[in-house]
Image: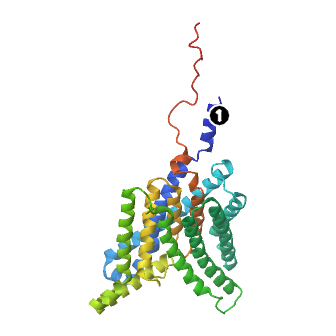
Amino acid sequence: MIAVTEKISDKLENPGLLFEWGLKSLLFAAFFELVLYRLVSRLGMHLGKLAEKYEAVRIGFRTLSSLGFVLLNMTAILVFLILGILLIQKMRTKLWVGQWDKVVIPLVALLVACTVGYLFFPPAMLGSVVYNILAFGILVFLLVEYWGTHRLWSQRLMVGTFFLGITGWLYYQTMSTSYGLLNILDVPPLVHEVNRLGEALMVLSSILVFWAYGSTSFVTKNKSQRKWGLTLLISGGGVFLLLLFMDYFLSLWSPATALEVRKAGEGIGWIFQMGMGYTFYLPFAFYVAGFTCWAYTVIKLVLIGRLAGYGLGLMFMAGYALQLSHLTLMVVLGLMLLNIDKRGSLGRLRKKIHDEPLYQPIRPVYGEQTP
């Protein structure tokens, strides 16, 4: 009977397939929403003259933008769903309990309530300031919880850098809105410097993702792993240096080509600035390195079912400029997934129960009873 009770308890504590497939759907929806709505639609604005000349181009961009808008709404709904399941499971089970849940759960619930309320009653400047301060408070507690449960300095450094980077945007947004609310015409102190520093820290954090979660140790005794790590380091370092000095080499070969490449880089920077908040003021090689390290690590972790892969994916796909409320929720959800990653993979948290009877009669110790 004890075994029966334990299995029934496991089923009650099981988050179920809804959480697993909802999280997978959220990751894919967020990615395609980023590509189609926040990037491709901006590309259509950048290629306005080409769209006016060719009707097919205009229809194509309009179709992709409409599809991206649908994915934006789908992403927002899935974020609400996964956050709701996560909060309920944190209150029902001990497996997902965190050290600061007594503070985090009410604050996250309040943030979700504010998000829903702002859908019906659009916030003014004061509402935006309150929302950003509330989000900052949640991120502080999630950061403290992460540092308390993760002992590797590479992981602590990565998440700490991400926190400081996203704080740069929150500071920029909060201070600018507060000055506008108070009708102060002066520029807030260090607002542009902090904003640029935050972008640089976000790029650095995306590079550190590989060190924290995706790298292979060079001091391992496994020769194949050591060979793979050295190959990755040499090839990646070579490509990084090539991109870093590409403008210099192109200017030596053809100044006209170098000028065209610079203009193309400015166009790419404009698209990403409008879609994700990155201005590309750093050398292009750093952004490529950050994207490569992040993409490799996320794909690797997602394929093995690690919640950290989904968390890192959502955190960085939200971008630097959290201009939409569901992007802030994606960052919060991503950090919460990182905090429960040590509890196990998706399969372990789901506690797969094979199709077998919950109760099996126990045979007598001294053989079968005779009538």
Image position, residue 74 (x, y; %): 51, 61
Tell me the SS state at disc 1: helix
Image position, residue 176 (x, y; %): 64, 84
Compared to residue 269, the image places residue 220 above or below, namely: above
Q: Residue furthest left?
A: 253
Of 235 and 282, nearer the camera is: 235
Image position, residue 195 (x, y; %): 57, 82
Image position, residue 356 (x, y; %): 51, 32
Using the rendered image of the protein, determine whether residue 70 is visible from the camera's viewpoint. Answer: no
List the residue tagged with mark 1.
5
Which color scheme does this rendered protein use? rainbow
Q: Residue at x 53, y 38 (%)?
A: 353
Of 219 and 353, nearer the camera is: 219
The C terminus: image quadrant: top right
The N terminus: image quadrant: top right
Compared to residue 316, the image places residue 27 above or below, namely: above
Q: Residue furthest top?
A: 371
